[in-house]
Image (cartoon, rainbow, N blue to C red):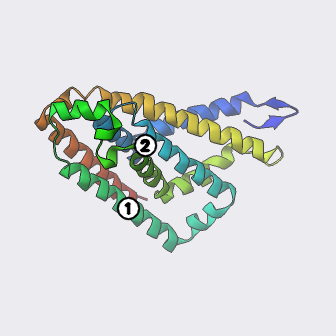
């Protein structure tokens, strides 16, 4: 992970890879958001939401690297305010998912075929923004990185290089897991989504999951 005498400690880096895989495969708001995007807009376009999530992860890492994460972790009022804001946003996404009207199969295929037919919330920028906000409004991510990052950073080595390797590793693994696992898993449900009843069922499942994750974010320490 960090350079010593020009060499890279591969064992530490592989430990980081394993930890990142475990964390990314743990279902959470990001995974649910990715699957919802893939179901609604298709696998390829779901990458925009994934990229938004990664920008949020980079911001979290920068915050921790600058030491601001300590303030968020120790300031109860600030932590609570951000936590409730994040939970409220997830509830909003869940309610909207519940209220989404089913699309006919022809309309569904047309929306997958061309961007101009896409509803506004399924276009690249709105998906990117949702992915960004889903991860950015989770203060527990800052606390997590505050505890997680120092395990892979050595103060007697070049910090910039270490943080660059750390960030690239975290982001690369999360993109792979989100896009090639969760989004592809959702892709398998698209045949089910061709029927109005199937669309309503899936929308309500994901809407409920968003609300449940919001509850976990607020009530479980």
* Residue 13 x, y percent position in the rendering: 68, 32
Residue 22 position (above or below residue 29): above
Describe the element under mark 1 as helix, strand or loop.
Answer: helix
Under circle 2, the secondary element is helix
Instruction: Report whether residue 154 is seen.
Output: no
Based on the displayed image, in which of its 4 quarters is residue 95 positioned? bottom left
Q: Residue at point 33% right, 49% down? A: 121
The residue sitting at 41% across, 29% down in the picture is: 181
Q: Which residue is mark 1?
A: 218
Answer few, some or many: residues within 10 Å of disc 1's Cα (few below 14, many 20 plus, some between 14 and 19). Answer: some
Closest to the observer: 42 or 91?
42
- Say which residue appears at 76% left-offset and 38% top-offset: 2
Can you say whether 150 is above or below 139 in the image?
A: above
Crowd tier of the residue under label 2, counting other residues whose Cα lies within 10 Å: few below 14, some 14–19, many 20 or above? many
Quadrant including the N terminus: top right
Dividing the picture into quadrants, the one containing residue 172 is: top right
Near-viewer residue (26 or 89): 89
Name the spot of residue 73 as percent of width and height, x first. Answer: 57, 64
Q: Is residue 180 above or below residue 64?
A: above
Number of numbered markers: 2
Answer yes or no: is residue 137 visible.
yes
Q: Answer left or right for 149 relative to 138.
A: right
Closer to the N terminus: mark 2 or mark 1? Answer: 2
**Residue at the extreme left of the image, as rendered:** 197
Image quadrant occupied by the C terminus = bottom left
Give the residue number, with chain letter if any, for mark 2.
Answer: 49
Q: Depth-wise, is mark 2 or mark 1 nearer the camera?
A: 2
Which x, y percent locates residue 59? 59, 53
Quarter of the image for residue 197 reads: top left
Marks 2 and 1, how far apart at CA: 23 Å
Report the residue at 27% width, 52% height from top: 94
């Amino acid at each position: 992970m960090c350079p010593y005498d020009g060499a890279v400690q591969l064992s530490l880096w592989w430990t980081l890879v394993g930890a990142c895989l475990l964390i990314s495969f743990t279902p959470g708001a990001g995974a649910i958001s990715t699957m919802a995007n893939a179901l609604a807009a298709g696998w390829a376009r779901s990458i925009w939401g994934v990229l938004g999530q990664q920008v949020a992860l980079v911001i979290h890492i920068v915050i921790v690297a600058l030491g601001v994460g300590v303030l968020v972790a120790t300031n109860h009022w600030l932590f609570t305010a951000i936590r409730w804001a994040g939970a409220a946003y997830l509830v909003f996404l869940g309610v909207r998912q519940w209220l989404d009207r089913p699309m006919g199969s022809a309309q569904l295929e047309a929306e997958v075929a061309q961007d101009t037919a896409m509803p506004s919330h399924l276009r690249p920028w709105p998906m990117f923004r949702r992915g960004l906000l889903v991860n950015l409004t989770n203060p527990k991510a800052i606390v997590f990185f505050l505890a997680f990052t120092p395990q892979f950073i050595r103060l007697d080595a070049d910090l910039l290089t270490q943080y660059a390797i750390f960030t690239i590793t975290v982001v690369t693994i999360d993109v792979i897991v989100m896009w090639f696992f969760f989004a592809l898993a959702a892709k398998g449900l698209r045949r089910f989504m061709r029927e109005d009843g199937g669309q309503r069922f899936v929308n309500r499942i994901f809407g409920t999951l968003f609300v449940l994750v919001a509850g976990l974010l607020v009530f479980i320490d």
